[in-house]
């Protein structure tokens, strides 16, 4: 295990999908004067200047060492970051710098209503070692500076489309559009939660968009129907705000029931849940399994999915499937959980805990690795107020407990 203390509070983390030695941490710092004002009267904050700052930090893993490659300071706090797995779209054969393939592969959500695009690229080797660097591509201001962009995701099939959630409750589709000399973001509001919209996720096939908010609402939207995008919504399942959504299985049938999708949700009510989403005219979401993880479930990430899984085909009822999931559980630390589908039955169990963190664990990620690699998984987790960054390992099939 390796531990580092950062200069600012870490809020999010993501490994580069194609350069797996590298990962990026986003930080978020709230100036004390603004924090005092927010504590006094939250309704006054939109008129206050943005007293938030942050940074993007690029790291490289070399053996058991965590090496800082680059730090980019930002004038606003960073709430979320997301790498894209796709190339840039075809923009009609133009060859301007703004449309070079693969340039925008990291999207950043900031507290000042901004979305920033960067590129992780390999520059010529230097005497400092690895030449990987983050290069700023574009800064966009699609929302008012008093608005926090809370969560950001790429569409799984269309590189020009992203989606974000906002502190004002809105769920917004963001589409990159190209002019003669620059790119701009076209926004389409799909839904508005009554409180902060904490999280969102596209369905496995990209047809639907799920969102969750502080109002306990879990909703499904059709981005193709912007004027009437809401397909269904549910406020009965979660006992507190919905903070994480992770689809894991496409359309499947269990005995007499058929579901559009199986997905995991996390909530401030400390529970992780497996939900079956409705098909056709049936609007009821079904809880297939749930487990109390001991802390608010802020983020969920797949460590390992079934190797034979085909998300575009129906899952046979008799098939047994296993998922290993990394859960960032705020004040409870990190959990590794195993999700099992055996026939029509679903089960959730904790297989590892990491509790070295002394404050809120908002960001954790697992280093991608090749299929069939039998080594332990390398995990990097962070905690907010104590500014810790920890590198540790999880070995499949072994129960692990690490506490401070």
Image (cartoon, grey):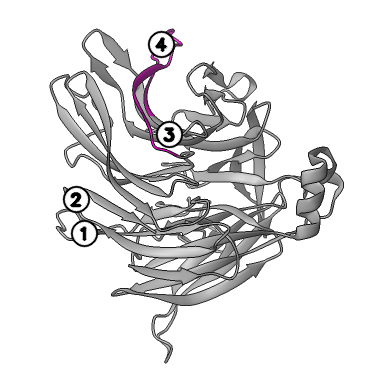
Instruction: Check disc 2 and report the residue beneath it.
Output: 396
Q: Earlier in the sequence, mark 2 or mark 1?
A: 1
Q: Is residue 53 above or below residue 307?
A: below
Q: Is residue 186 above or below residue 118?
A: above
Q: Secondary structure at mark 2?
A: loop
Q: Residues within 10 Å of mark 3 (few under 14, many from 20)?
A: some
Instruction: Check disc 4 and report the residue beneath it.
Output: 280
Q: Is residue 335 above or below residue 264?
A: below
Q: Quadrant of the C terminus?
A: bottom left
CA gap, disc 2 and disc 3: 30 Å
Please identify, in this view, whether the residue under mark 2 or under mark 3 is nearer the observer.
2
Marking on residue 376? 1
Membership of 292 in magenta stretch: yes
Marking on residue 174? none
Q: Which residues are magenta?
A: 273-294
Q: Earlier in the sequence, mark 2 or mark 3?
A: 3
CA gap, disc 2 and disc 4: 38 Å
Kindly indicate whether the residue at mark 4 contacts the one at mark 3 (C-beta within 8 angstroms): no
Q: Relative to residue 360, is residue 66 drawn left or right?
A: left
Residue 67: % across, % down: 42, 77
Kindly indicate whether the residue at mark 4 contacts the one at mark 1 (C-beta within 8 angstroms): no
Kindly indicate whether the residue at mark 1 contacts the one at mark 2 (C-beta within 8 angstroms): yes
């Amino acid at each position: 295990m390796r531990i580092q203390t950062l200069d600012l509070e870490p809020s999010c983390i993501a490994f580069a999908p194609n350069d797996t030695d590298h990962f990026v941490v986003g930080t978020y710092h709230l100036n004390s004067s603004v924090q005092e004002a927010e504590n006094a009267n939250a309704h006054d904050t939109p008129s206050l200047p943005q007293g938030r700052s942050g940074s993007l930090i690029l790291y490289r893993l070399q053996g058991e060492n965590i090496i800082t490659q680059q730090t980019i300071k930002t004038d606003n706090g960073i709430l979320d970051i997301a790498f894209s797995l796709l190339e840039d779209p075809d923009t009609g054969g133009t060859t301007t710098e703004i449309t070079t393939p693969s340039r925008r592969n990291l999207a950043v959500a900031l507290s000042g209503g901004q979305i920033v695009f960067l590129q992780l690229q390999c520059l010529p080797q230097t005497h400092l070692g690895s030449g990987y660097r983050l290069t700023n591509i574009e800064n966009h201001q699609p929302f008012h500076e008093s608005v926090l962009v809370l969560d950001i995701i790429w569409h799984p099939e269309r590189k020009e489309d992203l989606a974000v959630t906002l502190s004002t409750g809105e769920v917004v589709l963001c589409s990159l559009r190209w002019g003669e000399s620059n790119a701009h973001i076209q926004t389409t509001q799909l839904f508005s939660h009554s409180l902060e919209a904490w999280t969102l996720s596209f369905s496995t096939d990209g047809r639907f968009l799920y969102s969750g908010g502080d109002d306990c609402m879990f909703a499904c939207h059709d981005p193709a129907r912007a004027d009437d995008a809401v397909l269904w919504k549910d406020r009965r399942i979660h006992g507190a705000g919905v903070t994480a959504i992770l689809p894991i299985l496409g359309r499947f049938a269990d005995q007499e029931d058929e579901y559009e999708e199986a997905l995991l949700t996390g909530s401030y009510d400390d529970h992780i849940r497996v939900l079956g989403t409705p098909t056709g005219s049936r609007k009821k979401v079904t809880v297939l399994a749930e487990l109390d993880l001991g802390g608010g479930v802020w983020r969920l990430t797949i460590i390992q999915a079934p190797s034979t899984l085909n998300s575009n085909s129906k899952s046979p009822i008799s098939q047994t499937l296993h998922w290993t999931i990394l859960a960032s559980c705020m004040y409870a630390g990190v959990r590794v959980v195993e999700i099992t589908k055996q026939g029509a039955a679903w089960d959730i169990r904790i297989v590892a805990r990491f509790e070295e963190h002394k404050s809120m664990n908002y960001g954790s990620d697992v280093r991608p690795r090749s299929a069939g690699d039998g080594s332990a998984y390398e995990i990097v987790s962070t905690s907010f107020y104590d500014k810790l960054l920890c590198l540790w390992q999880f070995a499949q099939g072994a129960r692990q407990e690490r506490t401070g």
